[in-house]
Structures are given as C-alpha cells and as structure tokens.
Image (cartoon, rainbow, N blue to C red):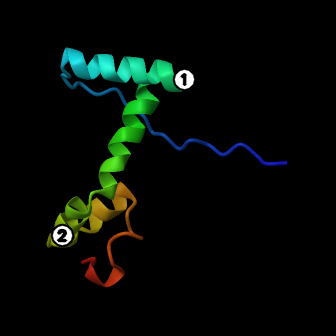
C-alpha cells in the first residue's frame, strides 16, 4: 500500500495583476486537467527552475545561499559554488 504524501504547500494569497487572456488560459487549462487554477499556476511557475540561464544567473550571484535554499535547488546549483 502506498501512503499519501503531503503536498507541502505553504500557500499564501498573492496580489498580482494578470491579463484577461492569462486568466482565461489558466481557467481553461485547469478545467482540462481537472486541477485547481492554483495548482496549474504553481506547476507552471516551478517549470521556470528548468531554465538553465536562470539557474546560471543564480549560480553567479555572490550571496546565493538564501535563494538556493528558498527555491530548493541545492541539487541543481553546484555545492562548491554556493557561498
């Protein structure tokens, strides 16, 4: 038997302004996937962590420990370059 794992989402409401088109995309994609709109946005935003240039930018920052820990990307950013 597999146990259910917690989602570990410390979700907070945010005050962002999105275009009507972006809201419609999220709405209909959520309907299509049968996920909530929040889950769709959360999943898509996490895909930003696959952007190699973004990860490289973080790796080149002088004080990156907090960023790496917050984004939970220790395995992506080389240990020796964290500092």
Instruction: Examine the rendered structure and indicate whether residue 72 appears above or below residue 9.
Output: below
Q: Residue furthest bottom?
A: 80
Residue 35 visible somewhere in the drawing: no
* Viewer-nearest residue: 25 or 46: 25
Which one is closest to the eye, mark 1 or mark 2? Answer: 1
* Residue at 18% across, 22% down: 17
Residue 51 image position (x, y, % from top left):
27, 57
- Residue 69 found in image quarter: bottom left
Residue at image position (42%, 31%) is 40
User: Looking at the image, which is closer to me, 73 or 23?
Assistant: 23
Residue 68 placement: quadrant: bottom left
Q: Which mark is residue 34?
A: 1
The crowding category of the residue bearing disc 2, from other C-alpha atoms within 10 Å (few below 14, some 14 to 19, many at least 20), is few
Q: Secondary structure at mark 2?
A: loop
Percent position (x, y) of residue 81? Answer: 26, 81
Q: From the viewer's side, name the closer residue of 68 and 47.
A: 47
> Residue 5: x percent and y percent?
66, 46
Residue displayed at 28% across by 68% down? 65
> According to the image, label 2 marks what residue?
63
Query: Where is residue 21 shown, x and y percent of the image?
Result: 23, 18
Q: Residue furthest right?
A: 1
Quick check: can you spot residue 48?
Answer: yes
CA gap between label 1 and label 2 equals 40 Å
Label 1: how many residues lie within 10 Å, few (<14), some (14-19) or many (20+)? few
Q: Does residue 40 appear to the left or right of 13 in the view shown?
A: right
Say whether residue 38 is left or right of residue 66: right
- Residue 60: which numbered mark, if any? none
Which type of secondary structure does the marked residue at label 1 adopt?
loop
Q: In which quadrant will I find the C terminus?
A: bottom left
Closer to the chain start, of discs 1 and 2, is: 1
Above or below, 66 against 32 in this view is below
**Numbered-mark total:** 2
């Amino acid at each position: 038997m597999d146990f259910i794992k917690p989602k570990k989402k410390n979700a907070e409401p945010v005050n962002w302004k999105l275009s009507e088109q972006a809201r419609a995309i999220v709405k209909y994609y959520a309907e299509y996937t049968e996920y909530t709109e929040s889950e769709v946005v959360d999943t898509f935003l996490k895909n930003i962590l696959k952007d190699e240039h973004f990860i490289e930018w973080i790796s080149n920052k002088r004080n990156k420990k907090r960023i790496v820990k917050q984004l939970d990307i220790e395995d992506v950013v080389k240990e020796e370059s964290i500092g």
